[in-house]
Amino acid sequence: MIQKIGTALRTQRVAREFGIETLVRLLSEYLPDEQISEVRRAYVFGAEMHAGQSRSSGEPYIYHPLAVARILGEMRLDHVTLIAAILHDVIEDSDVSKEEIAKQFGQEVAQLVDGVSKIEKIEGMSRQDRQAESFRKLLMAMTDDLRVILVKLADRLHNMRTLGAMPLEKKRRIAAETLEIYAPIAQRLGINTLRRELEDLAFANQHPHRYEVFVKAVAERLGDAKALIREIEQKLSRALADEGIGATVVGRQKSYYSIYRKMQAKRLKFLDVMDLLGFRVLVSKLDECYRALGIVHHVMKPVPGLFDDYIANSRGNGYQSLHTTCVGPEGKKIEVQIRTREMHHVAESGIAAHWQYKLGRKENANAAPQARAREWLQMLLESSGSGSNELVENVKVDLFPDEIYVFTPRGEIRRLPRGATPVDFAYTVHSELGDRLVAARVEGHLEPLNTPLKNGQTIEIITSKHARPNAAWLNYVKTAKARMRIRAFLKDQREDEAIRLGRRLLEIALRELGLPANTLNATNVAPVLKSYQLDEVEDLYASIGTGERLAPLVARHFLPEPVAGSKPVTRSSDALALAVEGTEGLLVDYAKCCRPLPGDDIIGYVSTSRGIIIHRLDCEHVQQRKGGPGERIALVWSPKVQGDFMAELKLQAVNRRGLLAGVAGAITEANSSIENVQMPEGASGEDVVEIRFLVTVRDRIHLARVLKRVRRLSAVDKVSRA
Ligand code: MN
């Protein structure tokens, strides 16, 4: 109890000293009371969570989130964003969970705070200087709700405002990051007020000395010009009022960073006062923009070629305005921007305008965050007129990326298509890494290789010297590079296999012709290659292995003299037969008509397109088919044969309830599994039906065990191998 009172007192003190009342005053300008009291409740909660923590400046920590909320309050953002701003560091810096925030302030706030925390977690990860663009895109891609980015930008702005006594090197690094990542994000989203201040602060911290000199020089030039500015303002206002246009004319100093950049780009050494100033004419209606332009050009002569119509041709981030440059008093060039107040509002707040609190406007209140972003994008597209606009395209890619960004263990960012897997990742990093891939750790946990990766994850690839690409990977890889490498590898592997198989087939055929074992030597091979117009003996073997040429026919070329007629092919002894191991891949295939199993007597047919097709010796196709010389190949099972084979069962049973379940159970108990079932259509009642099952077995013995189990079922009349 005492502790609670203590906390409450401390909270009150902080409230007085660090501006919740200032924030509340600001919010009372546009938010209803009940929403303001929610914000106040968030403040009390946040202050309690951050109690005892302080910033490097020594201030209580809560001052920072409060200031972030104030920046967003100045942008007139909704109370959900403000609450999230106040709580944006509580997950990172205290023990509060996302669930707790959801319970206290609702799911929407919790999502936002969680989003900001996720960004903060990965912020320190990328250690590569040149990856700013990727990192920027990663931040955008990670964000489902753009208010997360708004909070993050305000957070960055307040941090930039309070860099204070940090070492120069650190300030420079943060400033560079701001210029490379956060200012461009603000620009893309059209939030120009924020962007300008971020840029100026970054400039000041990156080159403190240059900045100081620069500010002084600008102030000196402007000091002379005050009277001139007022003169132009009055002249334009009067001329517009005379024509019945109620306009606001403001002369203003351009941002330091934009002046600095302009001087650098144009290699200017001397600051012309008019380069520092811009005049802005704000009117009420669109048509007044063009009328005002005519009046401005009447008052001051326009400089030819320096007019831009960004109303008809918007710049793409929502910015709309007329830009012109005129010759002012003393022959100075003056830049004038003309736009409506509404356009001005959009130009300053960009996408933030879509989350601003609007009194009495409900239609948009429930739109999903993504829908609002789409709405904004739609507006950009419309305002940019016809023709594709590069900037709109960029914004679109940033807001709705079809790419994801992940980290290597060294903190490098890799870009991948959405849905990409650890296999894609490995091949993106290095081809060798993909070829040797065996497993992957995603965020430190082993995950299946087909797991789709998510933004911001760190992926570690585990390799083995003996690992090889796997054909199954082709089912889920998303990148062209991975697909190409895996395919190329499999093709090479098939060629190797074809060469080995072809050589073996040729050796058998030679032996059947009674030729000695050393027949395949260079002297004998050369003329044969020549007759086939081949360069390498491997090409000859491969053509036999793939079934393009028949081994017995090729073998004949090795006979000393041509033999007339064909020698009948009989079943050869086991010593001469080719051993089938069941793993020869595409070059050996099992006939679907008889589905041979290890243990069956078998025979092979050479097929030109499919390699060798293996049949059971008692298959009726084999009985009927005569086959030309060399088409049939004697085969035996290798003792090493392993893997799953298919067998078809034919079953006669009384069709009663639970029959299928019973059979399925028996098959499973025999350690087999069902691949397919065929029931006769329209079977009903107590009919006797014939059902066909396709099951997996290792060999004949295993099949016998499966049959025995099924036969034991009372409903089953007969069961046999089909
Ligand atoms: Mn923060």
Image: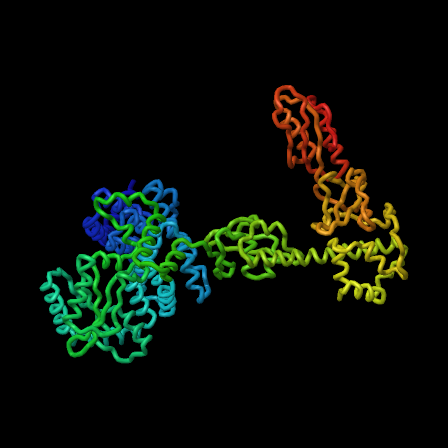
Counting the numbered discs, the total is 0
Q: Is residue 378 left or right of residue 562?
A: left
- Image quadrant where residue 214 sits: bottom left
Q: Position of residue 176 (x, y in %)?
A: 37, 67
In this picture, residue 180 sits left or right of residue 494 = left
* x 35%, y 40%: residue: 103
State the quadrant of the C terminus: top right
Left or right, 125 with respect to 364, comes to right
Q: Is residue 51 visible to us here? A: no
* Residue nearer the viewer, 257 or 297: 297
- The correct choice, above or below, for 184 with respect to 62 in the image is below
Relative side of 460 to 166, left or right: right
Res. 110 in view: yes
Q: Position of residue 254 (x, y in %)?
A: 24, 69
In the image as oriented, which residue stretches furthest toward the bottom? 269
Q: Residue 37 at x, y = what percent?
A: 24, 44
